[in-house]
Amino acid sequence: MAQWRELDEDLITSEVCMDCGRCCKTTWIQPRWNKHDNHEDSDKLPYLQAMFGKSSRSYVEERGDKVAVVNWCSNLRPDLSCGIYKNRPGMCVAYNCFKAANGQKQLPEYWNHIKPLVERVHGVSPYKRRDEETTSESSDDNNMGSIRTDAQEDGG
Ligand code: SF4
Ligand code: SF4
């Protein structure tokens, strides 16, 4: 198996997220709730309430031991800004798709969108620099693919 290469979590900045917004369109509900007892998921309810408020564009998919909810958060504006930014749920504050990816050793959903976005905004590779490196270019193919292939691109 190819070795996982860490993504640089510091590159997920508000500038990147403001051009992305993908995690405000999709969430996962995992049945193993006790796994999150000491996690920021303790405020999952307000997060889900925020996500399910008004959207007419949502659907649910069952897949293995997870349920995928594809939905535009009711607070996500057309320009991908958050309508309740200052009061957004703690999960939204804490979430970093590169951190999640490093934890799972799986590329984030929408990698094909996020990678060029990070490169454009920050002018560097999305991978964490190795000590011996001065540049990092070519290891995209060394990471495993995302488990998600079905997430809907809503456009807009
Ligand atoms: S998917 Fe990642 S880059 Fe996109 S908005 Fe969410 S945290 Fe930011
Ligand atoms: S509350 Fe804001 S940050 Fe959280 S999912 Fe909705 S739009 Fe995104």
Image: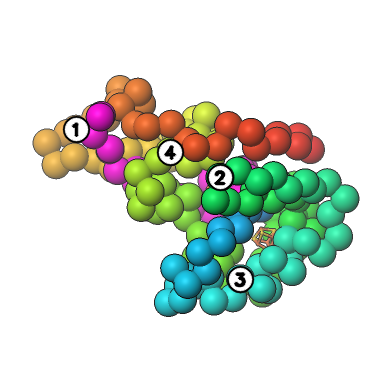
In three-dimensional space, the C-alpha distance between marks 1 and 3, rounded to whole angstroms, equals 41 Å
Placement of 119 over or under 74, stated as above or below: above
Q: Position of residue 3 (x, y in %)?
A: 23, 34
Q: Position of residue 56 (x, y in %)?
A: 87, 50
Q: Does residue 18 appear in the picture of this structure?
A: no
Q: Which residue, given by chain and number where applicable, does mark 4 sit on?
A: 107
Kindly check if marks 1 and 3 are in contact, taking CB atoms under 8 A apart as contact.
no
In three-dimensional space, the C-alpha distance between marks 2 and 1, rounded to whole angstroms, equals 42 Å
- Magenta: main secondary structure equals loop
In the rendered structure, the answer to whether residue 76 lies left or right of residue 106 reads right
- Amino acid identity at mark 3: Lys
Kindly check if marks 3 and 2 are in contact, taking CB atoms under 8 A apart as contact.
no
Placement of 23 over or under 39, stated as above or below: above
Q: Nearer the viewer, mark 3 or mark 2?
A: 2
The secondary element bearing badge 1 is classed as: loop
Q: Earlier in the sequence, mark 2 or mark 4?
A: 2
Q: Nearer the viewer, mark 1 or mark 4?
A: 4
Placement of 32 over or under 60, stated as above or below: below
The secondary element bearing badge 4 is classed as: loop
Q: Which residue, given by chain and number where applicable, does mark 2 sit on?
A: 64
- Amino acid identity at mark 4: Leu
Q: Residue at x 66, y 46 (%)?
A: 62
The residue nearer to you, when weighing 128 against 44, is: 44
- Amino acid identity at mark 1: Thr
Q: Position of residue 118 (x, y in %)?
A: 47, 38
Figure quadrant of residue 156: top right
Q: Which residue, given by chain and number where applicable, does mark 3 sit on?
A: 44
Badge 2 residue CB within 8 Å of ligand 1: no
